[in-house]
């Protein structure tokens, strides 16, 4: 067992023992969840374990797996066994990790929970009848998940390495004239995963599709004039995600200049992700940065101050700057102000901001500014914002390119943040 994993278990044990003491509990059960099925079908949806259970183990958890926690005792892993000739065997993974665990195997009909103490709480889907209700427990433990252990950060480094390899392959496929589907397949092959193993469905948009923030299709048609590729795709390491976006263009033109300037701005924002910084302030800096780009690239003639007053940057950058990252791509607790579930919601100027906390050392976050030419938002701007100052002819010139998003994954530090994504790309080249 690695020292990092042992320390990780120690941190988690301390967090959950504090929760049990706070809520006067004798035990907590973490459930990975059960498989769900498509309507009127025997085919299951892709399964992702509840992050609270997955956090404890150094491998990907399957369904119907349970972690039982009691103060002062080793955690217990309840491992499912099945009499099943339809599917591959599901043995307990071997390894030194077992030294710090009690491991029991159980069939679905076994009452492994029969001897649990009366004050046992449940976290995860499909709560069992033996568990007591514990209002506030989920928020209490979710708040701490934002700060990652060294074991978790190392897993995300590995996920970043695989994700960067996929992006490099995707760029090569784009430059070779491949379709969106072929580009996605190139990404999957290089990142060594299937589509169902991705931490989120990869976004692969050519040309105007790059202006659709969560573009969900993968066209099989090759384009004779593919100008832009926006790919937002990641990989995972036993559940820990990377979440990477890059925008590529084929020509050294004014749209490529816009990409380069947004990339420069994005890297500056990443370097600013230090402990003590309010993420809301970084988002506001991004809006000012987008306004500056609109002015410098002759897209809007208004000053930065006028643009901000009229909310022009939000037309071109409508989403939030980033979010917490970990076992969930949009990790939990982004709007929590404390363990008691006091909420700090985004204001009307940034309604889609997923992270409103002050940054702390070893949080892992995404930084993902964008600049898009979205017809719906541009039409709304023209209808609702008088004297918007935007050059619609120049905007029409850029619209066939779709838009730009650049996203890195950053470990917050007290001084120099660690940019997992840039490091992964550097090591891959």
Image: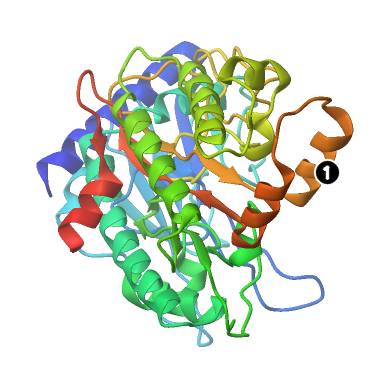
Return the residue at label 1.
379
Residue 403, given in percent of the width and then of the height, sits at: 58, 52
Q: Seen in the image, is 226 located left or right of residue 126?
A: left
Residue at 43% of width from left, 61% of height from top?
Answer: 248
Residue 152, given in percent of the width and then of the height, sits at: 28, 42
The answer to which image quadrant residue 159 occupies is: bottom left
Q: Seen in the image, is 383 located left or right of residue 335?
A: right
Count of labels in the image = 1
In the image, 131 versus 250, the foreground residue is 250
Mark 1 crowd level (few <14, some 14–19, many ≥20, 10 Å Cα): few
Element type at mark 1: helix
Compared to residue 253, the image places residue 343 above or below, namely above
Tell which residue pokes out farthest to the right in this image: 383
Q: Seen in the image, is 167 located left or right of residue 95?
A: right
Residue at 21% of width from left, 48% of height from top?
Answer: 423
**Can residue 326 be seen here?**
no
Compared to residue 324, the image places residue 125 above or below, namely below
The answer to which image quadrant residue 409 occupies is: top left
**Can residue 47 be seen here?**
yes
Instruction: Identify the image quadrant of the C terminus.
Output: bottom left
Q: Seen in the image, is 387 located left or right of residue 8?
A: right
In the image, 346 versus 251, the foreground residue is 251
Residue 216, given in percent of the width and then of the height, sits at: 65, 64
Residue 236, given in percent of the width and then of the height, sits at: 37, 57
Residue at 63% of width from left, 19% of height from top?
Answer: 308
């Amino acid at each position: 067992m690695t020292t990092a994993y042992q320390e990780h278990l120690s941190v988690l044990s301390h967090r959950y023992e504090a929760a049990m003491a706070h809520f006067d509990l004798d035990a907590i059960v973490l459930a990975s969840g059960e498989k769900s099925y498509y309507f009127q079908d025997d085919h299951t949806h892709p399964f992702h374990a509840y992050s609270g259970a997955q956090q404890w183990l150094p491998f990907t958890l399957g369904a119907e797996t349970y972690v039982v926690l009691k103060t002062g005792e080793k955690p217990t892993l309840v491992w499912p066994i099945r009499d099943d000739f339809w599917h591959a065997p599901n043995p307990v993974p071997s390894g030194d990790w077992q030294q710090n665990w009690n491991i029991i195997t159980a069939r679905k009909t076994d009452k492994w929970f029969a001897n649990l103490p009366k004050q046992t709480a449940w976290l995860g889907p499909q709560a069992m009848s033996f568990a007591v209700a514990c209002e506030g427990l989920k928020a209490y433990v979710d708040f701490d998940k934002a700060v990652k252990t060294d074991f978790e950060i190392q897993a995300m480094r590995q996920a970043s390495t695989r994700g960067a390899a996929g992006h490099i392959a995707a760029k090569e496929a784009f430059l070779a004239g491949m379709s969106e589907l072929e580009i996605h397949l190139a990404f999957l092959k290089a990142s060594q995963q299937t589509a169902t193993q991705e931490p989120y469905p990869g976004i692969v948009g050519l040309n105007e599709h790059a202006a659709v923030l969560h573009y969900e299709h993968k066209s099989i048609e090759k384009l004779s004039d593919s100008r832009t590729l926006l790919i937002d795709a990641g990989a995972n390491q036993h559940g820990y995600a990377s979440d990477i976006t890059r925008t590529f263009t084929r020509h050294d033109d004014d749209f490529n200049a816009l990409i380069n300037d947004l990339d420069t701005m994005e890297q500056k924002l990443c370097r600013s992700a230090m402990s003590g910084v309010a993420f809301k302030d970084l988002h506001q800096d991004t809006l000012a940065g987008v306004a500056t780009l609109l002015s410098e690239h002759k897209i809007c003639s208004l000053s930065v101050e006028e643009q901000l007053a009229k909310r022009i940057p939000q037309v071109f950058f409508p989403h939030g700057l980033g979010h917490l990252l970990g076992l969930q791509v949009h990790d939990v607790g982004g709007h929590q102000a404390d363990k008691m579930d006091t909420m700090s919601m985004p204001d009307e100027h940034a309604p889609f901001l997923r992270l409103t906390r002050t940054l702390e050392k070893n949080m892992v976050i995404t930084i993902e500014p964008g600049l898009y030419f979205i017809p719906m938002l541009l039409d709304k701007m023209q209808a609702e914002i008088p004297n918007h100052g935007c050059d619609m002819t120049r905007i029409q010139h850029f619209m066939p390119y779709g838009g730009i998003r650049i996203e890195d994954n950053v470990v917050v530090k007290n001084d120099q943040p660690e940019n997992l994504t840039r490091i992964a790309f550097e090591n891959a080249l």
